[in-house]
Image: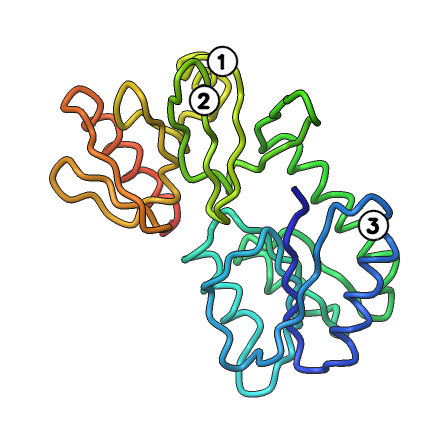
Amino acid sequence: MPFAVTIIDDDLSDSQKISELISDLDDSGKFVPKICRDPVSFQVSDFSDLYIIDIDIPDRSGFEIAREINQIAPNSRVIFCSNHEDLVFRSFSLNVFFFIRKANLKDDLAEGLKKFLKVSENNSLMVDSSVESVRVPYSRITCLVVYGNQVVIRCRDRAEYMIRNTLKNVESTLPAELFSFASSSVIVNVSQIEKISGSTIYMKDGSHFESSRRKLGTLKSRYSEYRLNCIL
């Protein structure tokens, strides 16, 4: 599954250049670049794994866009791109992943993509099947559900993967701060929870699950901790 990259720049020629460079640098199809045509009215709705943002957007700062992404899609990574190297220090407070100098675009972009892939390998679940082995980033996973003697991994883009294992074994490989049992047959990604009402867990993709009384307390605690960390 390739990583989705959204390029946000008011200069269409710069956006196209970045998109073409990503394709040139990516000889194994690991990235799918997409250009945002209207940066001023951009809203985080179709989540990407990586955002490359020009800081100097007229009528709307790239910093503002990055703050919105951090709040709504905190598992996504942000790379700033600018002609003004002095702005790199202002970007530190926004938990920005990397900084690209437009004057050194190709080399900086190559380094940023390389770093992103390295970090993503440590933040993903390896799924082995008879067809292929793929890494599924934690940020893409909505939930894991028992199906017979297999586990179905459901992603926010509606993709599904099946692995022959027990849910308990899979749970032991996942980061506890992101994943929690909703019931004995369902694990949810707390970053993908829209809300919790009573014992019902509503997910951002529109699905919902009933949580058992035994699991609900831990689930609520991890969800609260996750939301607090997003604010801090």
Read off the residue under disc 1.
165
In this picture, is 169 found above or below 179?
above
User: Within 10 angstroms of label 1, few (less than 14), some, or many (20 or more) residues?
Assistant: few
Q: Mark 2 or mark 3: which is in front? A: 2
Residue shown at the point (59%, 65%) measured from the top left:
90
User: Within 10 angstroms of label 2, few (less than 14), some, or many (20 or more) residues?
Assistant: many
Residue shown at the point (48%, 38%) measured from the top left:
141
Task: Tell me the kind of residue under disc 1.
Answer: Asn
N-term mark: 1 or 2: 2
Q: How is the image coloured?
A: rainbow
Residue 127 locus on image (x, y percent): 60, 25
Residue 132 locus on image (x, y percent): 70, 27
Query: Secondary structure under badge 3?
Result: loop
N-term mark: 2 or 3: 3
Read off the residue under disc 3.
26
Image quadrant assignment for residue 100: bottom right
Read off the residue under disc 2.
151
Q: Are the residues at dot 1 and dot 3 in contact (C-beta closer than 8 Å)? A: no
Q: Of residues 81 and 15, which is closer to you in this image? A: 15
Residue shown at the point (66%, 63%) measured from the top left:
52
Work out how far the residue at label 2 is from the one at label 3, CA to CA, in angstroms. 31 Å
Residue 126's tag is none
Residue shown at the point (41%, 33%) measured from the top left:
178
In this picture, is 86 found above or below 182?
below
Residue 156 locus on image (x, y percent): 46, 46
Q: Are the residues at dot 2 and dot 3 in contact (C-beta closer than 8 Å)? A: no
Give the side of residue 128 with respect to residue 209, left or right.
Answer: right
Q: Are the residues at dot 1 and dot 2 in contact (C-beta closer than 8 Å)? A: yes
Give the side of residue 201 with respect to residue 106, left or right.
Answer: left
Which residue appears farthest toward the left when viewing the image? 198
